[in-house]
Amino acid sequence: MRSILLAIITLLHATNLMAQETPYTRVFFDNSLMDKDHFYTSASYTSPSWVKNSSGKLPVSEEVYFTPGNALELKYNSAKGGQWQAQVLYHPIRGMDFFRPQEKLVFRLYIKSNTAATELPAVAIGKREAKELSQFLPLQNYMPNYKTGAWLTVEVPLSSFKGLNFSDAKEVDVVAFQQQAEDGKWHELYLDQVEMLPLQAGESIKSAPKLLSATGYEKHIDLTWENIEDPAVRYVQVYRSTDNKNFRPVAVQLPSICRFADYVDTVGQTFYYKISLLDDRYQETGPSKSISAATRPMTDEELLTMVQEANFRYYWEGAEPNSGLALENIPGRRTMVASGASGFGILALLVGIERGWITREQGVERFLQIVHYLDKAEKFHGAFSHFISGETGKVEPFFGPRDNGGDLVETAFLVQGLLAAREYFTANTPQEKEIRNTITTIWRGVEWDWYRKKPESDFLTWHWSPDQAWVLNHQLIGWNETMIVYLLGIASPTHSIPASMYYSGWASQSEKAQQYRAAWGQTKEGMMYTNGNTYFGIPLPVGVSNGGPLFFIHYSYMAADPRKLTDKYTNYFENNRNIALINYRYSIENPENHQGYSENSWGLTASDGPWGYAPNEPVPHADSGKMTPTGALASFPYTPEESMRALKHFYREYGHFLWGAYGFRDAFSLEENWVSPLYMGLNQAPITVMIENHRSGLIWNLFMKNKEIQQALKKIERTR
């Protein structure tokens, strides 16, 4: 399992950053996706001083801001004998690890109260994990043109902060503000755009903004603009109007994403838009021409198409440019291909062609790009690495030096997509023949039998490293997301494994397999592969604990049709449906009393979280209160009514923070007032693909047409 693998690896993050990566600016705060307060802050005090806080977090203001749509409130009373402190915490994002030089702390400050410069707080930087802060510096020393009632720029060279030992500015992940005076007065300040910048600001913007389209949906407007190549652009600023006269700024967007979803929460109204461009100094270009669109009521079928298409764009517009394949997450590394997410993305691209979001000609062009890249990419006994440099095709050991070879699970996720594509591109044209033939070459080259390690082994092994061999030594044992590996291994026309390994490996009941399941499930229920218990009134033939996270019923069954997968223990469509229903009923009962769980809000699975990537499942020890839209929405084939209610709820009730450029953001927690800023390659595509399998069976039908897959199922049948 991906989650177990991450726990096993526990490796240092790769430090060899690719020179081709466009560096990010290291931003501590630009906007909070959630109202009320900002998760990545803290505020504390000792009386008689006080600092306004919401459950120990700094509140956010949607009325006063430097960049739309909000800023941090810093409201305090600095009394004699008391003390207060507020911290803005850096949120590390996986893959956002290549930065511009960080030589000065810069932020915008608005003083609304009648506050003297000497009554302002002092500022420090620090390291959160070590609980270390530098000496505090008086803010007034870095504000030469001090005044109230206006946004001021505060710049403090990092070299001015004394008493903090760091060799790299990336170690600094705290900006702290602390009481300096003892005036006993009430002060009202606002903070925005807290970031680390080079000493010399970037160049001025040379390009002009060009807004291309505005499309209205039920409660949001999708905007697209011309691709931005100018490196001087820091943000695209979006303006909205209801009368085409009075425009106000409503959002900023990264220039690498050439679209914005403006969730207006209004049905049946026309809106007008302009955009402008901002540089490092937040100097603004002139606006684009205005463009308009109207929201409108949508049917259930229209909502399904809307959600599918939005998630599809992650793989079409958001692809790594050289390979045409999927990124691990957006934002994140921009030239690093994620193999498994790419396999899922290939399936999403097929849906996009079939639904008419792109033409077949566009699809053929992209697939030629994809297969040419994959054919030349570095392989390890035919298997692809987990991450690949989009620029060079070489392994990218993103999870650390041991993750530098073949990853059989990610390869299987990729190959299932390719085999479905081989059945889709059937035209008798040179281009489509080339796609088919190249896919066949890649497929025939994967040495599934090599990953058995030894001829007598009962199990396939996840990884092989060219210089460390089987150092990770993680065997593939179900129940989890890896059934597709055994299915493809048995189906291979050149390097097949015995069909008996389905029962000796994947569905093994050996002592080793029992211990493996009991360890990750923290229970003996299901340790035999079979389960046989009933949970929340639902029987579970196969599965550890009460079924595990929902990605178990998605990843291996996006292409392989579970309706046609029956072994001596169960039919996997029925089994998967029961796992989804257990997850659904757990959320209704909500034994841990997490905020927001209901019959309309369910779907515990693996995703980004307030404290990093983690799998959630419907058991108390693995339920942190985080909800992941892909959990419920990729379960559409199993639970169409329950999934449709979740889709409407997530969009109509939570869309103001959850809906974005590529569909639903990865996850959210109402009780932590947190939502992920990420779209994840492993989680966006299952929504598009599994909704399509529910609607038309497209991907299931394509994959199951492969003669090798049909033969593999017959082989497994004979071993029952």
Image (cartoon, grey):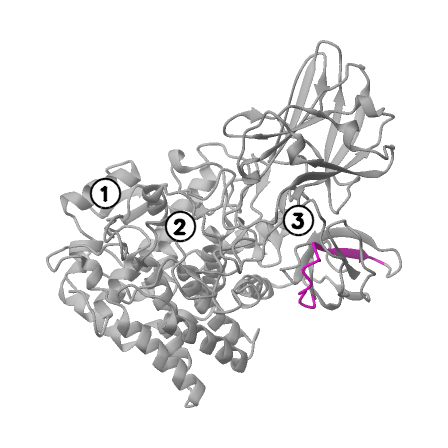
- State the residue position of label 2: 550
Quarter of the view holding residue 170: top right
The answer to whether residue 581 is magenta is no
The magenta-colored residue range is 225-242
Q: Position of residue 517 (x, y in %)?
A: 25, 43
What is the crowding at mark 1: few (fewer than 14 residues within 10 Å), some, or many (at least 20)? some
Residue 637 visible, this angle? no
As drawn, 369 above or below 681: below
What is the crowding at mark 2: few (fewer than 14 residues within 10 Å), some, or many (at least 20)? many
Q: Position of residue 505 (x, y in %)?
A: 19, 54
The answer to whether residue 241 is magenta is yes
Q: Residue at x 87, y 26 (%)?
A: 114
In the image, is 497 to the left or to the right of 94? left
Q: Which mark is residue 516?
A: 1
* Amino acid type for the residue under numbered disc 2: Leu
As drawn, 216 above or below 518: below
Q: How many numbered discs, if any? A: 3
Q: Position of residue 548 (x, y in %)?
A: 35, 45
Q: Along the polypeptide, which appears first: circle 2 or circle 1?
A: 1
Q: Position of residue 291 (x, y in %)?
A: 79, 66
Closer mark to the observer between disc 3 and disc 1: 1
Name the element at disc 3. helix
In the image, is 401 to the left or to the right of 299? left
- State the residue position of label 3: 656
Q: Along the polypeptide, which appears first: circle 2 or circle 3?
A: 2
Q: Residue 560 versus residue 365: which sits nearer the camera?
A: 365
Name the element at disc 2. helix
Name the element at disc 1. helix
What is the crowding at mark 3: few (fewer than 14 residues within 10 Å), some, or many (at least 20)? many
